[in-house]
Amino acid sequence: MSTTEVPSADRPPSWAHRLAGLGDRMLASRGWDHPVLRYAAIAFAAVLFITVVTVPLDVTMQAIFAGTCVVLALVLRKVPGRLAILTMIILSLIASLRYMYWRLTSTLGFETFLDAFFGFALLIAELYALITLLLGYFQTAWPLQRRPEPLPADPQTWPSVDILIPTYNEPLSVVKQTVYNALAIDWPADKFKVFVLDDGRRPEFREFCEMMGVGYVTRDNNFHAKAGNINSALKLMEGEFVAIFDCDHIPTRSFLQVSIGWFLRDPKLAMLQTPHVFFSPDPFEKNLGTFRTTPNEGELFYGLIQDGNDLWNATFFCGSCAVLRRAPLLEVGGIAVETVTEDAHTALKMNRAGYNTAYLAIPQAAGLATESLSGHIGQRIRWARGMAQICRVDNPLFGPGLKLGQRLCYLNAMLHFFYGLPRLIFLTAPLAFLLFDIQIFEASALMITAYAMPHILHATMTNSRVQGQFRHSFWNEVYESVLAWYILRPVLVAFINPKLGKFNVTAKGGVIEKAYFDWVMARPYLILLLLNLAGFIAGVMHLVFSAEGTSGLAFTMLINLFWTFYNMLIICACVAAASETRQVRDNPRVPLDLPAALHLPGGQTIACDMTDFSQGGIGIQLPEGAVVNLHEQVRVSLFRNRAESVFPADVVFARGNRVGLQLRDLTPAQQVEFAQMTFARADIWTREWGKTQRDAPLNALGTVFRTGARGFGLVFVHLWSMVDSWRKGELKVVKTKLDTGD
């Protein structure tokens, strides 16, 4: 993640760059190498920090202090460099810990049982949010930003690798492209083998593997799902390393060359993970229209958190797009089978055994995202259940083999999926006051504002600065709110009894032929929306018609109304996510601007540009004046460096200077060659990844607001559509089936 904009040579550095340079020199000072100075500075800083956090202030002085810190943070937002980020984190910690200290010491004098019940519920949610905030800062403050390690010059000295592609019920059309690309990897032919591990035991898969010359492995049971499938296959293989790809993850030609070098440098390295990126939109991106404009849910993890984990030697294995050293993997018993998040648990076992794990933040493979919101939720339920299981059966806080940094990174990963209950509390907390006059805060509105607002502002600004390349402000609330209701029960059940639950396979490669509103998935959000709307109306009525209100009570009412309005905004965005849009393409298009040539039947050749491609298809931009007839059989040339490959194709779309081609009758060798020219290009997945506009909190809030307004309108649109269909006798309700793994 870049934090410094280098000033141009023809203009002097700005004040921000001069300040950043001073900070970098301070961090690089050799004086910090002296232990006495270092420990004295740490002790002084600790005493000063505790004093600042705990010193009592009246509302005026607290407002002045908080305002000064906020202004300083606003200035530091413009300063490049790591020291500015660390300073913003410290300011955020001060604001958040001052707020929590004040909450614990000054706001808990409840008068009734209901006040105490709802008040302590909110306090628990706030404590959870604070802990995850602190651990998040710890993880992301200093990402390692590891670069590839070069391989020896002689390819014959490179190690042997087995490439495993596990599959269960995915269609062959999805698996084919992964196999083509695996065969296209640049590695000595006698040094790697490709295996399809088919737990579905399907004859068409066997025939395809025989045709392509790759290994086909089955077993007579499905014990332990994907983990058991891989472990069974490992007994049949001999490569020094194992590369694993989910059957929808398409690797580049450079995958092994980029990743293997670190294993040769570090003999204790057991696993190296690369990012999971997706060339199809996930349900949020598809239904909310944010594809390639707003970072998706997973980009924060793969763009920043894993890079931060790498600093502490706590990189998680994510089940795909990774290389593992065989010997350590077998030493820890293969892929873990005790939980349904077998990947993260395997990495934990390797770290406990004294082995290193690493992360390389360079996309070298891409896959298909889930098509529907229900499928997306089902996948997240499995992740949440698995982390709760790890929390019980192999808690990283306890046991041997881990350093403090590793324990904290794994702890944050586990705690993250316990957000279901806290998120629901935040979405309903102000309703206790608005609907039932329950006092969840025993403090004046001014004091609440003076302590709570700096905490919120600093957290927003700091996370925007740290995470802004991979997560825009306020979108985390949307993602978590959509999932909160659904992961709550599985997480609690798994925490109580980790043996319950099974591995559920995430469906990929499907289509959505007709747009529809998923009333089943949206039901919790609609109930929450109605409750918040009722609370908002009740609060407004109280403000307008209450003749007994004081200025303090009115201010308290306004705070709760603002909180409720924000909750309604988030909930409406959740509703919008449940409005499934059409997805009629089995093979999503990947944008790619490259020179091409079109060879017509009459012998004419047209120089043109490829604009996009898919599995079996190419989009072409013709020069002005060129004409290609629909349904014409042509040949198309694609170029890579000085190499040219020619493929037969049919013209299936022609409009103006835009032409769509469908590849025709490709041989297995041509399929691999086409993969080399397109999906397997070394830079294909790095072009767009992490390239969205950096976060600007106010702009992000506006985007969420517009999304929420759209979601609110969609409710009435779909209600009217249902009424109209019912009136015509044409009502058909899509019954969503959610696979929770129960």
Image (spheres, grey):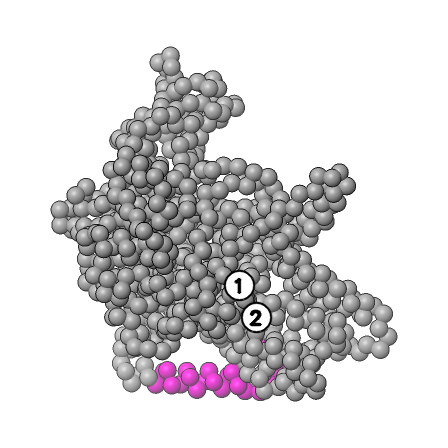
Residue 429: image x %, image y %? Answer: 65, 71
Which residue is labeled 2 in the image?
A: 422
Q: Which comes before the other along the chain, label 2 or label 1?
A: 2
- Tell me: 730 left or right of 670: right
Residue 19: image x %, image y %? Answer: 42, 66
Q: Nearer the viewer, residue 183 or 131?
A: 183
The answer to which quarter of the image holds residue 546 is bottom right
Which residue is labeled 1 in the image?
A: 487
Q: Nearer the viewer, residue 463 or 81?
A: 463
Instruction: Give the residues drawn in magenta, as a range.
Output: 40-67
Q: Amino acid at mark 2?
A: Pro
- Tell me: 162 left or right of 365: left
Q: Name the residue rendered at 68%, 71% in the picture.
A: 430
Find out whether residue 45 is within the magenta segment: yes
How many neighbours does mark 1 have within 10 angstroms: few (below 14), some (14-19), or many (20 or more)?
many
Q: Nearer the viewer, residue 36 or 323?
A: 323
Which residue ends up furthest to the top in the rendered image?
602
Please, is residue 248 above or below residue 675 in the view? Answer: below
- On the question of residue 502 being in view, the answer is yes
Q: Name the residue rendered at 40%, 32% in the picture.
A: 616
Main SS of residues in magenta: helix
- Tell me: 419 left or right of 569: left
Which residue ends up furthest to the front in the rendered image?
220
Please, is residue 119 above or below residue 602 in the view? Answer: below
Q: Name the residue rendered at 44%, 60% in the picture.
A: 502
- On the question of residue 9 being in view, the answer is no
Q: Which mark is residue 380?
A: none
Residue 388: image x %, image y %? Answer: 45, 69
Q: SS at mark 2? A: helix
Find out whether residue 146 is within the magenta segment: no
The answer for how far apart the CA atoms under marks 2 and 1 are is 12 Å
